[in-house]
Image (tube, rainbow, N blue to C red):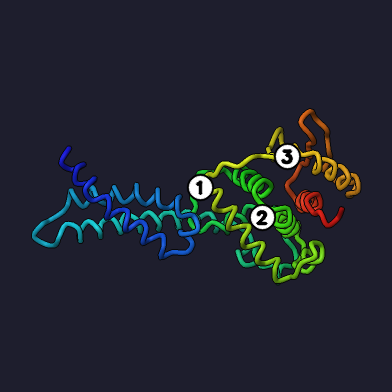
Amino acid sequence: MEEKWKKVEDNMGLIHIISQRTILNNPELNRCYNYWYEEFIGEGKLGLIKAIDTYDDTKSEFSTYAGKCIENRIKEFLRKEFAKKKGYAQNVSKSLDEHLNFENQENSNADNFCDTLIGQFDVIDIDKLEEKEFILKYINIILNCLSTRNICSIFYFLAGKKQKYIADKLHISQSYISKIKNESFEYCREILYTDKIYSERFCLKEEKNEYILTISTHEYSIRAVKIIDSFDKSSTIVCRRNKTGMTIWTQDLDEDFYFVLAEIFNKQLI
């Protein structure tokens, strides 16, 4: 056994090379380099152990055979990850193009927000997160990690607003809106993949079948009150003050809620 593990240690360089090459040759994997690198190192070790156990020195050099076993193990791992994502995606009601196309989108169905987000992750293991947990975690990343302009763009988009409407609201060109969206989703995807730590000025959570957004900054607390007071009186979205700032309560994560968030962060309205 000691001899086997010594051989694994001696050939770790081969695993590192193959892992790096696989990620760098695939733009989707390269966006979250650290996450995939760690996964591939683990899978590569299993491939190397298989190579040690099954190697026949009469057929090829060990490094050649081990390299093939490592590659096959990593490819099999990726196939399973893609299959999980594909199986989950079969349950969505709209195609990815409909969700992510600003130009052609007539209406956005907020109930399919999770579908939209999952579409941003080509090979993530969705099974690790419940749907609500996934949505809450992603929205919190949007709220805490993006610039105010990008937050507005994303939430106007999720509220079903067209590209021209968003561009007019933010006083920027329509072509720039698409760039903002793509960059924002890519950045949020990296944070979710790698579990980066970020400070929480805003925290959205679920409690007793209601969603509660806590705002700890004075500026946005004041804006939240103004925006919600001027919003549709039939809406179920309400503000409540507490010791740490302001909370926004809503029964649903729907288009009205996303629109309110976009308006709160839109400093062009000041």
Q: Amino acid at mark 2?
A: Asn
Which quarter of the picture shows residue 169?
Answer: bottom right
Position of residue 112 measured from the top left corner of the image (x, y, whole percent): 66, 55
Instruction: Mark 2 or mark 3: name the one nearer the start of the chain.
Output: 2
Report helix, strand or loop for mark 1.
helix
Which label number is shown at residue 136? none
The residue shown at (71%, 33%) is 208
Label located before the other in sequence (1 or 3): 1
Q: Residues within 10 Å of mark 3 (few under 14, many from 20)?
A: some
Residue at the disc numbered 2? 112
Label 2 sits on a secondary structure element that is helix
Residue occupying the far left of the picture: 58
**CA gap, disc 1 and disc 3:** 26 Å
- Determine crowd level at label 2: few under 14, some 14-19, many 20+ residues with C-alpha closer than 10 A: some
Q: How many marks?
A: 3
Residue in view at x 56 percent, y 49 percent: 191
Q: Are marks 1 and 3 in contact (CB under 8 Å)?
A: no
The residue at 73%/53% (across/down) is 148
Instruction: Please give left or right for residue 184 compared with residue 164 in the image.
Output: left
Q: What label does residue 194 carry, if any?
A: 1
The disc label shown at residue 211, or none: 3
Please determine whether, in this image, residue 50 is positioned above or below residue 240: below
- Farthest residue to the top: give it: 243
Residue 118, above or below 250? below
Query: Answer yes or no: do the residues labelled 1 and 2 have beta carbons within 8 Å?
Result: no
Whether residue 18 appears in this view of the structure is yes
